[in-house]
Amino acid sequence: MKQTVLRILFLCATLSLLLIGCTTAKTPAEPTTPTQQTTVTQATASTQVTTTTQATTPTQTTAPTETTTPTQATTPTETVAPTQPTTPTQVTNPTANPDDPLLQQYAINAARLDGVKTVAIDPGHQRKGNYTKEPIAPGETRCKAKVASGATGVSTGVDEYVLNLEVSLMLRQELLSRGYQVVMVRTSHDVDISNASRAIFCNNSGADIAIRIHGNSVDNSNVHGALTISTTDENPWVGVVTQESQRLSRLVVDHFCQVTGAKNRGVMISDEYPGSNWSKIPVTIVEMGFLSCPMEDEKMATDAYRQLMVQGIANGIDAYFQQMSDY
Ligand SMILES: [Zn+2]
């Protein structure tokens, strides 16, 4: 009996110990495990969140910045954009101009407010002529080649389109230095602008007058001297402008010959030039000299004589506007 009681007691004690042991073993295990897990999880979680947040934040910040940068890059592209449509316009449209027409227009508007006169310069011809036809005047059925490549110096071999542009660029400088605003029909040889288109461009440019620069040529190598060309009194397309074109032509050729010493061949009148018939502003064609005359061709190739020609034309323009202000 005692043995039985002892066994029961022993078993009870063992069970109690086991129970306590299990409880004791579980108790430390429970807080440790979750604590560690929580810590790790939290650390990981916070690291992940932080990392994600940090990664996301700069990425997001960068993204708009990057979006802004292309937008900023687009702005100069937009500035270029008007120039790009201008290039094809130079080939096909009367409003063509190698210089930015829009900027020139702003400058002219500003100049007008200041009472500054604007001169349009048309350097005659271009590297490659365009021999398709255009009407010689608005509403006219008679046609002429759009634009020729021009004459060639009989002695120097200088092409007229080159002479015309080089003198025109010098004239632009001279007129600017005298306080005029200047617009150029072309500043490059590689354009395709018809004579009617040149006149329309000058009309739309806001210029007060147009000066068309040319070199002359005939079959006789002895013929030399300068002349200007204007429309006639009977010209049906230009109206009262013809009177002013004649006055401008007279003043320019007289001053030109006074300064250069060239033979004065006077003002030729004709209604056969589209560049004049399409004009809505006073216009003169300046035939500076004969490329078919060796002596004059060689003279016109020199910088010194070109300076004289430019001074003479500019003096004629001065006189033209001076007479207007005298009225
Ligand atoms: Zn010519």
Image (tube, grey):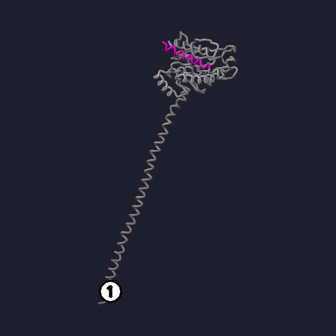
Neighbour class for label 1 at 10 Å: few (<14), some, many (≥20)?
Answer: few
Q: Cβ of disc 1 within 8 Å of ligand 1?
A: no
Image quarter where the N terminus lies is bottom left
The answer to whether residue 8 is above or below residue 90 is below
Residue 309 within the segment the image draws in magenta: yes
Q: Does 19 sit left or right of 149 as displayed? A: left
Q: Nearer the viewer, residue 258 or 186?
A: 258
Residue 92 within the segment the image draws in magenta: no
The residue sitting at 45% across, 46% down in the picture is 63
The answer to whether residue 246 is above or below residue 54 is above
Residue range of the region highlighted in magenta in the rendering: 308-327
- Estimate the x, y position of residue 140 in percent, counting from the top left: 53, 15
Q: Nearer the viewer, residue 160 or 41?
A: 160
The residue sitting at 49% across, 21% down in the picture is 116
Q: Would you say the magenta stretch is mainly helix, strand or loop? A: helix
- Estimate the x, y position of residue 36 in percent, counting from the top left: 39, 66
- Estimate the x, y position of residue 101 in percent, counting from the top left: 51, 27
Residue assigned mark 1: 7
The residue sitting at 49% across, 13% down in the picture is 326
Q: Nearer the viewer, residue 261 or 2?
A: 261
- Which element is circle 1 on? helix
- Estimate the x, y position of residue 171 in percent, counting from the top left: 58, 22
